[in-house]
Image: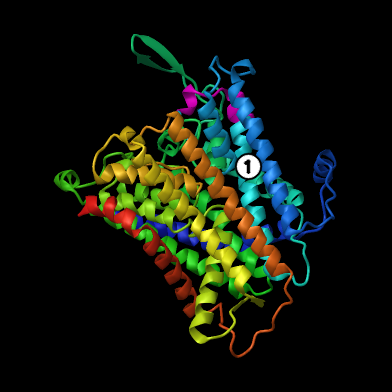
């Protein structure tokens, strides 16, 4: 069997598996966020934090709850990192430097999990388990909660309430993320992933001395990482490490895990608004963009464009032989189409055009299917933008799911899509203008690609990297930390403001002039708007970076 054929079968099996669980798992997610009954343990959590689970919240209160929870999380994690040498199971590691602790705290609370360090030589077990791993759960739950709040905005009328953030956060964590992580961890352990607190005893000689590299709770952290909660991991090479991803079978499972929640959330949207076909339209847009991204990444890597790949017959640099070119390319596309950011190969070593595709996937806004929650609310705002453009073309007031898209709504949607490009382009320009791009290991167009990739990954809360650039300096840790912070919470505030505006409206019955938003025409329009927005915004940066290198 050829490499290309094996790669096609790998992708097709993923599509079949995702389609098989879409309805069942989507319905379960809907019951979790729409149910009114609380378990005894959940009621205990509400009493502990002083929350009335039956009280609804306006968009402003919901947003303040998100920001307050995240601010406390950042402060707690920052203190954890700075004081780790005084903590149990610190393994004798020094406290993390201030700029590094800031970057890491923001990174994990914003669901980015960007790592400027190597986990096995920087963090003790307690910080990894009680600090970083906890944020892997709750930061993902925050994204899903915000998406659910926006969906409620479409579904409700003449009300200011979007639900209760604390109830959503608790239920999603306890009923969705924790159970899947347990089942997934067991499956990965069967596949050969290690699960202990001293997984190794590897001894590496360094400049006349020795350093003992000890493992961590690898299996459970790997599942948490692959649930769309972003990259990183105990070993900085994460899914390329044989302890975390030993076989092609575990590689398939990890890709499935990072796609299953975001691809199932459109079912929640369809059921909540009472029109399943609307959910099918959204998942169709996700599927078209995802298949295109995966196919192009595979095509560019399998073609082996470049002098060395053509000479040896394959673009194998930076890839694990046990995965090969195609399965590595599929993982790279899936991890950047979502906001996972985990890697099983070295993106910096991809061919020029192959390396461009993970960058483009993130620039699309990570909506195909995107991060857990973030992909759905990003794509719904794209749908709102598409409806508005269509309304201008025919001279009618645009409507979507029975809600009018007026001046306030389109302003919020427009600001949402201006945030990330502004952060990426201003950040990259600042790095070049201040000379901080000199930490790149390459020169010319590839060096620019490394800089742009770093800011694109941080601003989109992805966490992957070209990695051919040193980002452990105070300037880089501070700048990327700011991009992660603003790239996460400014869009969330705008999404919740839009949800509040929609929830207050009186639903408008569909008429002859209403644009059908469940048909193939609308699906194609949303795909087109998504691609055009990216092309108009980022084409100059791509032309100076990967396109120039590829040509």
Residue 94 visible in the shown view: yes
Left or right, 197 with respect to 306, comes to right
Toward the viewer: 198 or 491?
491
The quadrant holding residue 273 is bottom right
Place of residue 123 in the rendered image (x, y in percent of width and height, measured from the top left): 53, 24
Whether 149 is among the magenta residues is no
Please give the name of the residue rendered at 84% of the width and 41% of the height, measured from the top-left corner: 44
- Where does residue 154 sit, x and y in percent of width and height? 67, 69
Q: Start and end of the magenta stretch?
A: 118-130
Identify the residue under disc 1.
137
Residue 345 can be seen in this image: no
Is residue 439 depicted above or below 506 in this figure? above
Percent of width and height locating residue 191:
49, 39
Image coordinates for residue 394, horizontal then vertical, percent: 51, 86
**What is the magenta segment's predominant secondary structure?**
helix
The quadrant of the picture occupied by the N terminus is: bottom left
């Amino acid at each position: 069997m050829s490499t290309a054929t094996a790669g096609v079968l790998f992708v097709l099996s993923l599509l079949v598996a995702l389609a098989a669980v879409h309805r069942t798992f989507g319905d379960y997610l809907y019951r979790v966020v729409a149910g009114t009954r609380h378990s005894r343990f959940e009621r205990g959590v509400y009493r502990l934090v002083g929350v009335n689970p039956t009280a609804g919240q306006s968009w402003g209160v919901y947003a303040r709850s998100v920001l307050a929870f995240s601010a406390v999380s950042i402060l707690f994690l920052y203190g954890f990192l700075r004081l780790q040498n005084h903590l149990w199971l610190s393994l004798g590691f020094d406290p993390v430097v201030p700029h590094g602790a800031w970057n890491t705290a923001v990174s994990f609370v914003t669901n980015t999990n960007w790592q400027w360090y190597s986990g096995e030589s920087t963090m003790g077990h307690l910080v990894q388990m009680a600090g970083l791993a906890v944020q892997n759960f709750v930061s993902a739950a925050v994204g899903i909660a915000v998406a659910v709040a926006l969906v409620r905005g479409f579904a409700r009328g003449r009300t200011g309430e979007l639900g209760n953030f604390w109830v959503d956060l608790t239920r999603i964590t306890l009923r969705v993320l924790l159970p899947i992580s347990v089942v997934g961890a067991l499956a990965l352990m069967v596949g050969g992933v290690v699960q202990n607190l001293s997984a190794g005893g590897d001894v590496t000689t360094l400049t006349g001395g020795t350093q003992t590299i000890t493992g961590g709770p690898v299996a459970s952290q790997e599942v948490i990482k692959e649930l769309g909660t972003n990259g990183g991991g105990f070993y900085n090479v994460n899914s390329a490490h044989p302890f975390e991803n030993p076989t092609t079978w575990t590689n398939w499972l990890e890709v499935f895990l990072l796609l299953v929640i975001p691809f199932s959330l459109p079912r929640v949207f369809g059921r909540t608004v009472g029109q399943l076909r609307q959910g099918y339209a959204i998942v169709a847009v996700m599927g078209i963009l995802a298949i295109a991204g995966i196919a192009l990444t595979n095509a560019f890597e399998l073609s082996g464009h470049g002098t060395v790949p053509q000479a040896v017959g394959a673009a194998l640099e930076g890839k694990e032989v046990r995965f090969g070119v195609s399965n590595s390319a599929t993982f790279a596309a899936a991890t950047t189409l979502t906001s996972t950011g985990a890697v099983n190969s070295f993106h910096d070593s991809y061919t020029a055009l192959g390396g461009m595709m993970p960058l483009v996937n993130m620039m699309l806004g990570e909506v195909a299917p995107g991060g857990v929650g973030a992909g759905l609310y990003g794509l719904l705002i794209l749908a709102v933008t598409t409806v508005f453009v269509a309304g201008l073309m025919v001279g009618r007031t645009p409507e979507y799911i029975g809600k009018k898209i007026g001046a306030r709504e389109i302003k919020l949607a427009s600001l949402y899509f201006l945030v990330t490009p502004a952060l990426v382009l201003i950040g990259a320009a600042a790095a070049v203008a201040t000379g901080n791009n000199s930490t790149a290991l390459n020169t010319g167009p590839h060096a620019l690609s490394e800089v742009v990739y770093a800011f694109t990954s941080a601003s989109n809360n992805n966490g992957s990297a070209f990695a051919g650039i040193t980002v452990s300096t105070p300037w880089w840790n501070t700048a990327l930390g700011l991009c992660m912070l603003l790239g996460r919470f400014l869009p969330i505030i705008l999404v919740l403001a839009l949800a509040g505006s929609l929830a207050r409206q009186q639903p408008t019955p569909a008429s002859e002039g209403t644009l059908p938003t469940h048909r193939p025409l609308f699906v194609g329009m949303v795909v087109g708007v998504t691609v055009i927005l990216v092309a108009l915004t980022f084409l100059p940066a791509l032309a100076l970076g990967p396109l120039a290198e590829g040509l």
